[in-house]
Amino acid sequence: MEATSDLLQEFSALSAKKQLEQIPQLIDQGDAGFACLREFLMAQEGQAATPVMGRICQVLTQNQTADNLLFMQQEFPEGVVELKSARGIDYQIIQDKLIEEEFLEADILTLQKMCELAGESAMKRKWLYFTEVERFPDEDLLTLDQLWQVYSGGKFGFSVQRKLWNSLGKDFNALWEKIAWRDGRTWARYPKAFIWNLDAPRGHLPTSNQLRGAKTILALFQHPVWTKD
């Protein structure tokens, strides 16, 4: 217990970036390291989910020691992101896939849930009009964005893509290159040409099957939710 307490104190004193870097070293320490991660996660309960919490959730779920399995079943059976929806959409399946780092499945499900959010017509055609994206509730966009951010160490998410787009002077051609959706004049073929792990460039995911062109993703980036406090 003393060793765990020392590890927890050291880990808690680090910045979020350093904590993410430290997690693999704690895993290598076995039981003591896992105990530290469990205690840290318990101490964050009730707070807004962060990428550090998301990474710990992934690690504890994927390393199924008896203690880790029991802890996750009892304390965080659904993950660490609170799933809010103004229209009663259930996003739990996306959270489950992201915890398992099944990013392709999570990407496919993200588009499906966005179509469900848009309504019956979008569900039938399986893609979105920009006018439908403009009417998305704030709560739902924030939930989807938080899911991708929390379970990617802060690398993925709509708001991450939007920040990159802004930093590139709102140049979509530059954005496509930056996030590896296009190389020169060649578009990445979905899904085989995309990178479905955390080695992908910042902002690479979600693709949401590339949202059928710039009009739809422009509507997403210009949604008022991103400029509210």
Image (cartoon, rainbow, N blue to C red):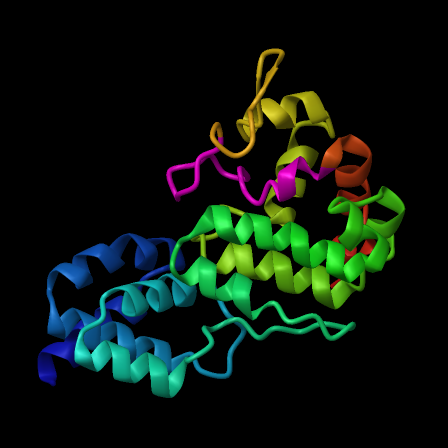
**Among the 4 quarters of the image, the one containing residue 217:** top right
On whether residue 94 falls in the magenta region, the answer is: no
Furthest residue toward top: 185
**Among the 4 quarters of the image, the one containing residue 42:** bottom left
Give, as a single range, the part of the protein colored magenta: 194-211
Q: Residue at x 67, y 62 (%)?
A: 142
Is residue 198 found left or right of 127 in the rendered image?
left
Kindly tell me whether residue 13 is visible in this rendering: no
**Taking 57 as reference, is 181 above or below it?**
above
**Taking 211 as reference, is 123 above or below it?**
below
Q: Residue at x 36, y 68 (%)?
A: 57
Residue 114 drawn at (x, y percent) = 71, 55
Q: Nearer the viewer, residue 87 or 51?
A: 87
Quarter of the image for the N terminus: give it.
bottom left
On whether residue 197 falls in the magenta region, the answer is: yes
Q: Residue at x 81, y 51 (%)?
A: 122
Residue 47 drawn at (x, y percent) = 51, 78
**Dominant SS in magenta:** loop
Q: Nearer the viewer, residue 12 or 133?
A: 133
